[in-house]
Amino acid sequence: MDQSLKEPSISIIIPVKNGIATIRQCLDAIYSQTLIKSSEVIIIDSGSTDGTLDIISQYPVRLVQIPPEDFNHGTTRNYGVSLAKGDYIMMTVQDAIASDDYWLETMHSHFSDDNVAGVCGMQMIQKLQSINPFEWTRTVNPPRIRAYQFKNISNYNALSANKKREICGWDNVNSMYRKSVLTSYPFEPVKFGEDIRWAISILKEGYKIIYDPHAKVAHYHPFDKNSEFHRKYIEIAQDDILLELKSKRVPLLRSFVMLLYKAYKWRINPKWMFTQIHRWLIYNQAHKQYIIAKRNHSKHEIIKQLFI
């Protein structure tokens, strides 16, 4: 980058709680960025007890602590924005690791277009022995730059549910915002899905959003049956309520045949096959429970229970 040009002022906001396993990698990657000298890092900790704060103290971050019960995906991030000095807001998480030193620079390059309200980067899954090999090839984001803008809200409303899901698959694991827009259109005070809700609302306001797969972070959730069920249940409900996208059960027989083929072709340890099958069973269980919830509760009741 031409150092004679004025560098942007970026505020990087990271909600944290008990992130000792990854927070050092996360911060090391951030402090290696080409634009770090004109950036600030704001960490909002909601009750870490595992030594995370000791690691954070080794970096020149701005640490803010809140009670665990006050954490909310929407309001906590809005609080971070209110503290930010930068013209651009970078949202990420404690277990996301920037893939190169140009992560911030790549994101910021799109804001020369005044219509751009935000840029969402790509999440990738590292090929590590500790990560399920069947997840290595899972497509998290399409590998091309995509820009979306609707001058007329009716054009957005006319889209299919699947297309809306593609366009609004926004994620605060790896997203940069124009602060002036984010201040005018803050995140909703919800427990989950503040990022997707923001993307929907900002598109309806006529702004442009961009997805850039060149701005990558490594991000992966290890399998845990309890959190897996909760996450999948929320995703199914969110797709239905926000995007009118009806999720389908995993076809177990067909999926199992494909799983066997991949396991043989890639010579994968059988233990990962059982993990993958367990994932599918949990997804189908979450799908079943959501269908039951829809029969017994109104849409408003489900929204209140899950998101507010």
Image (tube, grey):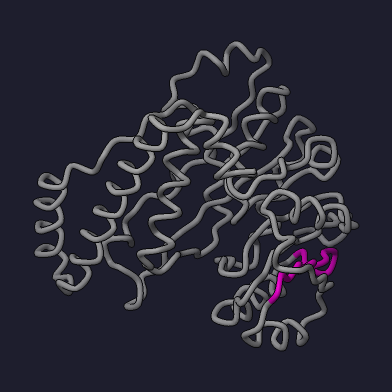
The quarter in which the N terminus is drawn is bottom right
Q: Where, by quadrant of the figure, is residue 105 drawn?
A: bottom right
Residue 244 percent location from the top left of the image: 46, 25
The answer to if 13 sits in the magenta stretch is: no
Residue 98 percent location from the top left of the image: 59, 66
Q: Is residue 293 above or below residue 16?
A: above
The answer to if 42 sits in the magenta stretch is: yes
Q: Is residue 71 above or below residue 235?
A: below
Residue 247 percent location from the top left of the image: 35, 35
The quarter in which the C terminus is drawn is top right
Residue ID at (38%, 68%) = 224
Residue 208 percent location from the top left of the image: 68, 30
Image label count: 0
Residue ID at (71%, 40%) = 188
Residue ID at (62%, 50%) = 191
Q: Where, by quadrant of the figure, is residue 100 drawn?
A: bottom right
Q: Is residue 5 at least partly visible in the picture?
A: no
- As drawn, is 275 to the left or to the right of 150? left
- As drawn, is 52 to the left or to the right of 138? right
Residue ID at (70%, 68%) = 68
Q: Is residue 298 at least partly visible in the picture?
A: yes
Residue pushed farthest front? 296
- Please report the bounds of the magenta region as a residue range: 35-47
- As drawn, is 211 to the left or to the right of 54? left
- As drawn, is 124 to the left or to the right of 151? left
